[in-house]
């Protein structure tokens, strides 16, 4: 009886051992097969909170940039010889269209005339490039910088006034009062003056006259410039505290100089008498 029990326990132990062995090696073979079938996607990812975890990683590629990456706007200027497009629409230095051409032809024209290629419009087919001189590029950069400077910043209110260079004196005084009220509220004020026919008044002189009237509070944000033929613009802004202090110091110095000159003139007159 004892012998039969012993044999029964041995058989049971053997069956359990075989079952556990199959389970162990079966799991091991499955994991090995998965790692062999999907080698690019399995990796050990270090995590500061855990020792090691298994997970999927994205394939890495250097040829394409992520779609979420914002495209930077290139600064206005010469592109050199770095032209990624095969066919271009080219404009010459006088603003005349030369039509579509291969980039090699555009580069040949650039070298032949000693000019520079500037990208004007990229989001068209084909992209538009212009041949320009260094002086033309510099002048265009100054115009764009002035335009950007004159554009109101977020949160800043910009008011606008427009009138003719033949404006009457009373009307001009009314305009200046309105400008002063806006400046006191720290608004930007864009002033547009149109050149009237048969009027000899200089528009830039009018701008200076307006600024002189509000000089204790305002200064130029954008200096007077010609926007188009017969039209000039400028933008005024409220002076900062530092600028106001500097302006007050200059005015005091100017007044002291005037008083000193008047005193010297008075003494000189007394001596001659």
Image (cartoon, helix red, strand yellow):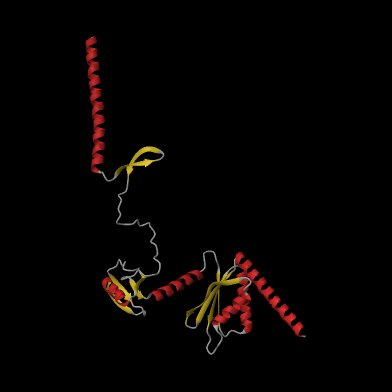
Query: 193 or 10: nearer the eye?
Result: 193
Q: Quadrant of residue 163?
A: bottom right
Where is residue 189 drawn, in percent x and y? 56, 72
Where is residue 128 drawn, in percent x and y? 34, 72
Query: 105 or 193: nearer the eye?
Result: 105
Q: Which residue lies at the image location 41% right of the left edge and 39% below the top edge? A: 49
Query: 55 or 22: nearer the eye?
Result: 55
Where is residue 202 drawn, in percent x and y? 55, 84
Where is residue 234 drawn, in percent x and y? 53, 75
Instruction: State the residue lying farthest toward the top.
Output: 1
Instruction: State the residue lying farthest toward the front.
Output: 271
Q: Quadrant of residue 245?
A: bottom right
Q: Which residue lies at the image location 57% right of the left edge and 78% below the top edge? A: 207
Quarter holding the C terminus is bottom right
Q: Which residue lies at the image location 54% right of the left edge and 82% below the top edge? A: 203
Horizontal arrangement in the rendering, residue 54 relative to residue 264 (left or right): left
Q: Which residue lies at the image location 75% right of the left edge and 85% below the top edge? A: 272
Vertical relation: 32 (above or below) 129: above
């Amino acid at each position: 009886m004892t012998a039969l029990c012993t044999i029964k326990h041995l058989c049971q132990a053997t069956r359990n051992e075989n079952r556990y062995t199959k389970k162990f090696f079966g799991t091991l073979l499955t994991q090995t097969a998965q790692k062999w079938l999907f080698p690019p996607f399995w990796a050990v990812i270090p995590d500061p909170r855990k020792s090691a975890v298994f997970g999927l990683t994205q394939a890495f590629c250097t040829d394409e940039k992520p779609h979420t990456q914002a495209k930077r706007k290139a600064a206005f200027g010469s592109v050199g010889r770095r032209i990624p497009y095969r066919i271009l629409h080219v404009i010459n230095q006088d603003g005349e269209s030369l039509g579509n051409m291969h980039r090699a032809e555009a580069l040949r024209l650039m070298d032949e005339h000693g000019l520079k290629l500037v990208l004007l419009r990229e989001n068209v087919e084909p992209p538009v490039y212009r041949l320009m001189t260094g002086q033309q590029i510099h002048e265009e950069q100054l115009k764009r910088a002035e335009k950007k400077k004159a554009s109101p910043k977020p949160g800043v209110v910009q008011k606008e006034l427009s009138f003719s260079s033949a404006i009457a004196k009373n009307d001009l005084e009314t305009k200046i009062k309105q400008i002063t009220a806006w400046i006191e509220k720290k608004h930007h004020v864009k002033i547009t003056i149109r050149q009237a026919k048969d009027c000899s008044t200089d528009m830039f002189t009018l701008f200076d006259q307006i600024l002189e009237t509000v000089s204790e509070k305002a200064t130029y944000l954008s200096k007077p410039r010609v926007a188009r033929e017969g039209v000039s613009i400028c933008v005024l802004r409220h002076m900062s505290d530092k600028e106001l202090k500097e302006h007050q110091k200059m005015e005091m110095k100017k007044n002291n100089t005037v008083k000193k000159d008047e005193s010297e003139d008075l003494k000189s007159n007394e001596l001659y008498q």
